Amino acid sequence: MDVSMVICLLVLGAVAGFAAGLLGIGGGMLLVPLLTMLFSWQGMPPELVVHAAIATSMTSILFTSISSVRAHQQRGTIKWNIVWAMAPGIGFLSGLVGAGGGFLSVPFMVWCNVALHNAVSTSAALGFPIALANSVGYVVSGLNEGATRPGMLGYIYWPALLALVCTSVLTAPLGARMAHRLPVQTLKRVFACLLFALAAYMLFKAWQTFAAQ
């Protein structure tokens, strides 16, 4: 990787880590589209780009979630009973898109009358088992395809993973601390804005695909 690529990944990791701590999301919904662009820019084979972006994003969540969970656990706001109940069932969809599941679990828990700060903290804890299971899956499923590409461990592009994790594990606790300082209404608005932005991006990509046909 060249210097510009490393800088982009470090910045991206910092933003994703802060968002993970602040909102209880894994950060994958931010990482996957941008990693797809960066990997394409670096000349990665088109047949590997999307898989590599999803797998690398998911594995980065494994490390980011540990950092985020430690910060939330210090405040005692993680509902571990909810973690054990939910972890087996939201992992499949998360694995498909390379996200930690917070974009689903936080709204669901709030709908179930879990306080927002508890929902964010609990969602952060949910990210670890989801990321672990899916990371192993992407390594195993991509062993043949990734073997021909330097830097690939299965579908995981580990040089990019290292750059992302270097900053994400540092900024995740900062986001967690900010989450507990912000008023609930402000946190709700931030989360809503992120969801709207992601929805707009998905609609734009769908329109691009439709227009290209």
Image (cartoon, rainbow, N blue to C red):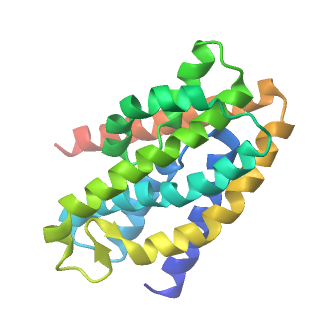
Spot occupied by residue 180 in the image (x, y as percentages of width and height): 81, 38
Report whether residue 188 is seen: no
Spot occupied by residue 94 in the image (x, y as percentages of width and height): 38, 40
Report whether residue 161 is seen: yes
Spot occupied by residue 55 in the image (x, y as percentages of width and height): 34, 58
- Farthest residue, direction bottom: 2
Query: From what the image shows, is residue 212 above or below residue 15?
Result: above
Viewport quadrant of the C terminus: top left
Q: Determine the residue positioned at 70% across, 60% down.
A: 171
**In terms of depth relative to the viewer, which is nearer, 62 or 201?**
62
Query: From what the image shows, is residue 43 above or below residue 56?
Result: below
Query: From what the image shows, is residue 51 above or below residue 79?
Result: below
Viewport quadrant of the N terminus: bottom left
How many circles with numbers are drawn on the protein?
Answer: 0
Q: Determine the residue positioned at 44% across, 34% down.
A: 87
**In terms of depth relative to the viewer, which is nearer, 142 or 37?**
142
